Amino acid sequence: MALHEGVVYGPIRSRRLGRSLGINLTPAHAKLCSFNCTYCQYGWSKSSHGEDRRSLESWPSPQLVVRAVSRALRTFADRGESIDRLTLAGHGEPTMHPRFAEVVDALRAMRDKVAPGVPIAVLSNASTLEQADVRTALSTIDERYMKLDAGDARILRAVNGSTMSFETILQGLSAVKNIVIQAMFVKDRTGRVDNATDLSVINWVGALQRIKPAAVHIYTIDRAPAWPYLQAVPLARLHEIATQVRRAGFVCDVFARTEPTSPARPEHAAGSPGR
């Protein structure tokens, strides 16, 4: 899928978020993410996100974000079209923005004036939660959808292409209250990637028990992934995983992939879905 050319995109008809106006906080022509997920609909991350993050000029300013979103909201209101959510997602990790807290504050103030009552949501891979300012900003957002596809470091590397400490991710997720965990279950024909095995799911449910999320959303790929050998996990297996999550005491929803005979439904990156 092509990268977004500006701040605002959509509205997207999301499986989870309704009619959602997407907000891309990463630079327009660079896929910057702390993960390199096998299933990402935007392909592999090719840029050095560390270098680009230090260059503030490449990131949209809080003022630019607010102007773009406000203009879009007014346009849709003039057409009589409603928006269910404002969603920070895009083609990279939104919380990597060097001024993420300022963006969130400015966006909330604008929303209260232009579109009161429309929730602000974020799709994040939870890789920046060791930063106190990011955690504080997230606490002021209405809905926090945080990725956790793995229950151990090996699966984190295989599925998400991350060498981060798995313990660091769990500690960060445990420190943010009232989150929804979003998990993408995938496998591939080579056997290199598979987070839907019995052991992988047991470890992942154990991680949920440490985090104690408000709810859990599970799904599988519905777009062409970065790793071409990746396959969707059957719906029956997703429901088996959901049953285990519910037995552990959590609310869990399954979001089925589009049937092959149906028109494809667009979706935010999970984490972008996914990322």
Image: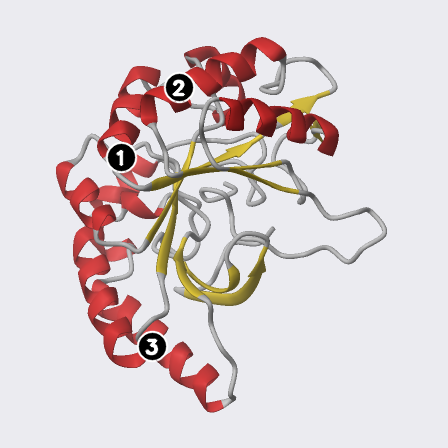
* Along the viewing direction, whichever of 209 and 231 lies nearer the viewer: 209
Within the image, what quadrant is residue 68 found in? Answer: bottom left
Residue 53 image label: none
Of labels 3 and 1, earlier in sequence is: 3
Q: Position of residue 259 (x, y in %)?
A: 79, 47
Of labels 2 and 3, earlier in sequence is: 3
Q: What residue appears at the point 52 percent right and 81 percent down from the top-left corner?
A: 81
Q: Which residue is mark 1?
A: 128
| Front tag of 3 and 1 | 3
Q: Residues within 10 Å of mark 2 (few under 14, many from 20)?
A: many
Tell me the kind of residue under disc 2.
Answer: Ala
Tell me the kind of residue under disc 1.
Answer: Thr
Q: What residue appears at the point 47 percent right and 72 percent down from the top-left corner?
A: 83
**On screen, 19 above or below 181?**
below
Of labels 1 and 2, earlier in sequence is: 1
Q: Which residue is mark 2?
A: 207
Q: Residue furthest top?
A: 199
Q: Residues within 10 Å of mark 3 (few under 14, many from 20)?
A: some
Q: Which residue is mark 3?
A: 115
**On screen, 109 above or below 245?**
below
Tell me the kind of residue under disc 3.
Answer: Ala
